[in-house]
Image (cartoon, coloured by chain):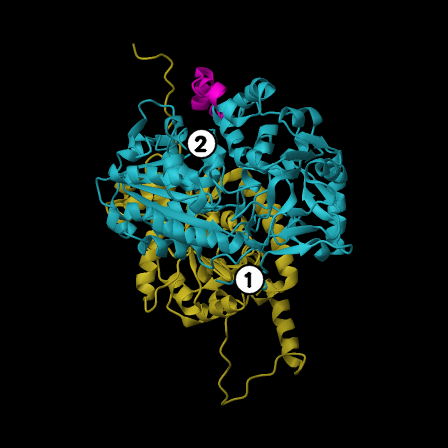
Chain colours: A yellow, B cyan
């Protein structure tokens, strides 16, 4: 045993000699020790981040940092805001998810009065895995933890309480960023919460953020983006969350088509059931990548210097 | 219908002026005047307050399309794959001022296209039914139909302005029993269905006039846009007593008999022209209800406007977008639809008035249907005052025969060279020669209407058709025949003289000048307009 280890052991012994309350009281025999309740992950308490000082700080971050950064790297075109004209009260904003750039882009695109009373459903296992990461997420984007690894009622209950208190929710029904550039099947959380709370869902399609910071990249690059807001949707009477979720996914698919083509083409294809899907063809990986086309701009076409004779 | 945010709107009423009555706000182009009216013999007609808008406009539109009026099937039943669908819509002249986004036409057109998409309709054209008005710019079209519709159709050439001088694009469908040619857009005539999307700002709009006038050119318009018809339209805002509308209705029958199927969608708006709050809200308040803040705001605004150059004043007002709300929407067969629409317009605008007076005063605002984003030239001043405001009556004119109209407007000798090229020549050549509508019609109309340069500018630039200033003059021909004198307060004397009217510096001067015609101590009616009102004179 070296000198340092010896010193540590002596210190522990001295501490052990000190009694309560200078040290924790020992657990009496025969009493079950209290469970060590983790305060990270889905249990992280974000209530502080919705108090006034944190909201002011977040507004400053959104307007002072995110907006100029997004203007430079994302050059966003926002369409369809007129569709929100008639909506009042809290909304569930449900968007497709390609990149970490989605959240700042949406937080600067969602209009008032929702922008500054917005919480973002964030993966508990990713954003709230550490105290620092959790605090930063809660402060900067108003993140609230959502458990995506197991079925749990607590996340839903917590968000329903927030909605009842006037907060709107931004949620990515795909459950995480796209792994390969194509969308993923929607999970039912957004539809469930909208039905449970009796509020509308606004489908949103975000295009172009995959090129800025796709999953697996650490440094962003500039790209043009489009944020398309769809018509607010409410569940029909007796409509199940599953059916409503399917409609929601179809609406985002329609918006994607509208962004790629135009509104009229998208509407016709939506009614004909021929809108190009968000999730891409069900083929192997390289063919899915191939089907995405040249979206990352790596392939450069050579400029023709001379006309064809 | 009530949205629960505002107390029930008060109806319009007539205020008898006494010594306690405050000075009354007169619009004066892109400015204002406060005028004290003589006590004991003057009255002011105030418009009704804005009716509540529909709570769910989208739902109401869809409901109207699925439950049409008259002898018409629901719109989805009229749509099928392989058909030719034409959607025509009112142009920039409606509503006034242009409304805030989303424009009603955007809402309606998107609902119609949604049903067409559901039915698998591929062949769709959208046409701004502007007849011989100037073409709409891209910005104006975007504002009207929305970016979604514009981006989907305009780049492919499927959304465009009517070209009523395109020999291949127009067709004569037939003749009415009165020998009137029915000139019509060929694409609409050859379509399986024409959906017309209208905004009925005043009772003159809509009905068969939407298509028989909006989708026609000079060949058809000359049969009802003439002095004889307009002098016999008493008034042109009252369809039952309007020769203009009778002619359009005859043409509507010919269009129907030619096999053109029209699905008419008409909407009405409230008269919330200047908003319930904001910088112009005081313009639709009654003077004695102005708060201290309103008064301070008015003084600041008036002082500011008085020192600004005309261009800057115009720019400020041209930027105003009215917060109109839709009060009704109905669709289906043209006449059944228009019946309900007219009743809804009257519900907002009609104010009962008893008897006529010797003098009618009016403050003319900065805008009329033909100078949106443009200049209100002297001919348009005449048209707005004598063509539109004078005719905003049902029953009898507000002023007795041989009486005097006193209008307030700066009437600058100023024209928009792109929008109104033929107006310049009309003002310089025709009005310098005569102001008699009959003589103008017989001697000059054909020459201007068929002028190749004006036709070229109408088709390729943003110019009103060569004959348009004539129609403006004819629009006022009923008033010119009815009145003993027209006086313009604050008008440019040279321009006013050219119009054949008299200029006065102040309202008391104008009243003094009027007494030459109507005698001393004349009775006076002031029409406080806008927000729009229509007098129901008994």
* Parent chain of label 2: B
Question: Residue B414, relative to residue A64: is it above or below?
Answer: above
Name the residue at 61% across, 83% down: A25
> Is B124 on the left-hand or right-hand side of A200?
left
Question: Residue A26, relative to residue B189: is it above or below?
Answer: below
Relative to the observer, which residue lies in front, B213 or B119? Answer: B213
- Residues beneath discs 1 and 2 located on the same chain: no
Which numbered circle lies on residue B225? 2
Q: Quadrant of residue A239?
A: bottom left
Question: Is disc 2 surrounded by few (<14), some (14 to 19) or many (20+) residues within 10 Å?
Answer: many
Q: Quadrant of residue A4?
A: bottom right
Say if residue B148 shows up in the picture: yes
Task: Name the mark nearer the viewer: 1 or 2.
Answer: 2
Instruction: Magenta stretch: give its range.
Output: B442-466
Residue B417 is one of the magenta-drawn residues? no
Q: CA distance from mark 1 to mark 2?
A: 78 Å
Farthest front residue in view:
B519
Residue carrying label 1: A131
């Amino acid at each position: 045993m070296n000198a340092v280890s010896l010193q540590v052991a002596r210190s522990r012994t001295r501490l052990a000699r000190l009694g309560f309350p200078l040290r924790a009281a020992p657990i009496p025999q025969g009493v079950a020790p209290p469970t060590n309740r983790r305060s990270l992950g889905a249990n992280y308490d974000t209530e502080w981040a919705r108090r006034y000082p944190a909201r002011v700080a977040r507004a400053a971050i959104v307007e002072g940092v995110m907006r100029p950064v997004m203007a430079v790297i994302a050059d966003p075109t926002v369409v369809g805001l007129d569709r929100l004209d008639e909506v009042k009260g809290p909304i569930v904003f449900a968007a497709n998810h390609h990149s970490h750039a989605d959240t700042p882009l949406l937080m600067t695109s969602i209009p008032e009065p929702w922008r500054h009373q917005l919480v973002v459903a964030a993966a508990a296992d990713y954003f709230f895995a550490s105290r620092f990461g959790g605090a930063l997420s809660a402060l900067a984007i108003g993140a609230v933890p959502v458990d995506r690894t197991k079925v749990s009622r607590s996340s839903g209950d917590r968000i329903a309480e927030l909605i009842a208190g006037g907060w709107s929710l931004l949620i990515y029904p795909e459950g995480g960023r796209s792994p390969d550039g194509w969308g993923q099947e929607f999970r039912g959380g957004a539809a469930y919460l909208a039905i449970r709370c009796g509020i509308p869902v606004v489908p949103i399609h975000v295009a172009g953020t995959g090129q800025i910071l796709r999953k697996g990249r650490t440094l962003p690059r500039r790209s043009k983006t489009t944020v398309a807001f769809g018509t607010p949707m409410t569940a029909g009477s007796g409509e199940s969350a599953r059916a409503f979720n399917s409609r929601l996914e179809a609406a985002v698919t329609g918006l994607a088509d509208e962004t790629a083509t135009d509104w009229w083409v998208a509407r016709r294809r939506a009614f004909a059931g021929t809108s190009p899907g968000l999730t891409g063809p069900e083929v192997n990986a390289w063919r899915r990548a191939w089907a995405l086309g040249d979206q990352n701009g790596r392939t450069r076409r050579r400029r023709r210097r001379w006309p064809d004779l | 219908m009530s949205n629960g945010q505002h107390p029930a709107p008060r109806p319009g009423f007539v205020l008898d002026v006494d010594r306690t009555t405050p000075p009354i706000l007169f619009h004066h182009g892109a400015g204002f005047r406060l005028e004290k009216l003589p006590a004991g013999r003057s009255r002011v007609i105030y418009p009704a307050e804005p009716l509540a808008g529909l709570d769910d406009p989208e739902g109401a539109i869809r409901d109207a399309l699925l439950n049409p009026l008259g002898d018409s099937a629901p719109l989805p039943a009229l749509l099928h794959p392989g058909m030719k669908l034409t959607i025509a819509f009112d142009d920039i002249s409606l509503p006034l001022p242009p409304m805030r986004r989303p424009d009603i036409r955007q809402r309606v057109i998107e609902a119609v296209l949604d049903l067409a998409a559901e039915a698998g309709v591929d062949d769709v054209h959208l046409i701004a039914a502007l007849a011989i008005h100037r073409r709409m710019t891209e910005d104006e079209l975007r504002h009207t139909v929305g970016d979604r519709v514009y981006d989907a159709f305009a780049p492919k050439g499927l959304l465009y302005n009517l070209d009523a001088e395109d020999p291949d694009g127009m067709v004569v469908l037939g003749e009415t029993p009165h020998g009137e040619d029915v000139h019509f857009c060929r694409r609409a005539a050859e379509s399986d269905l024409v959906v017309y999307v209208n905004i009925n700002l005043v009772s003159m709009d809509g009905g068969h006039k939407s298509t028989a006038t909006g989708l026609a050119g000079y060949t058809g318009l000359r049969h009802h846009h003439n002095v004889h018809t307009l002098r016999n339209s008493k008034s042109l805002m009252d369809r039952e007593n309007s020769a203009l509308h009778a002619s359009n209705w005859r043409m509507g029958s010919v269009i129907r008999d030619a096999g053109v199927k029209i699905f008419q969608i008409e909407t009405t708006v409230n008269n919330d022209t200047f908003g319930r709050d904001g910088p112009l809200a005081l313009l639709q308040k009654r003077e004695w209800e102005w708060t201290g803040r309103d008064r301070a705001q008015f003084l600041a605004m008036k002082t500011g406007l008085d020192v600004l150059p005309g261009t800057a004043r115009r720019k400020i007002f041209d930027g105003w977008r009215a917060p109109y709300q839709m009060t009704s929407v109905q669709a289906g067969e043209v006449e059944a639809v228009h019946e309900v629409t007219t009743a809804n317009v009257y519900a907002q605008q009609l104010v009962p008035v008893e008897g006529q007076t010797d003098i009618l005063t009016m403050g003319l605002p900065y805008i009329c249907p033909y100078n949106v984003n443009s200049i209100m030239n002297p001919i348009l001043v005449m048209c707005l005052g004598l063509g539109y405001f004078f005719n905003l009556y049902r029953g009898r004119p507000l002023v007795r025969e041989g009486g005097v109209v006193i209008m307030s407007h700066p009437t600058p000798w100023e024209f928009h060279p792109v929008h109104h090229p033929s107006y310049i020549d009309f003002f310089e050549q025709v009005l310098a020669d005569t102001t008699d509508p009959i003589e103008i019609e017989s001697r000059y109309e054909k020459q201007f209407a068929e002028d190749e340069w004006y036709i070229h500018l109408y088709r390729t630039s943003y110019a009103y058709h060569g004959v348009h200033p004539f129609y403006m003059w004819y629009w006022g021909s009923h008033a010119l025949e009815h009145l003993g004198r027209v006086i313009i307060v604050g008008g440019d004397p040279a321009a006013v003289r050219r119009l054949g009217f008299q200029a006065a510096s102040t309202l008391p001067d104008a009243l003094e000048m009027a007494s030459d015609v109507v005698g001393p101590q004349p009775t006076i009616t002031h029409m406080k307009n806008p927000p729009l009102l229509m007098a129901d004179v008994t």
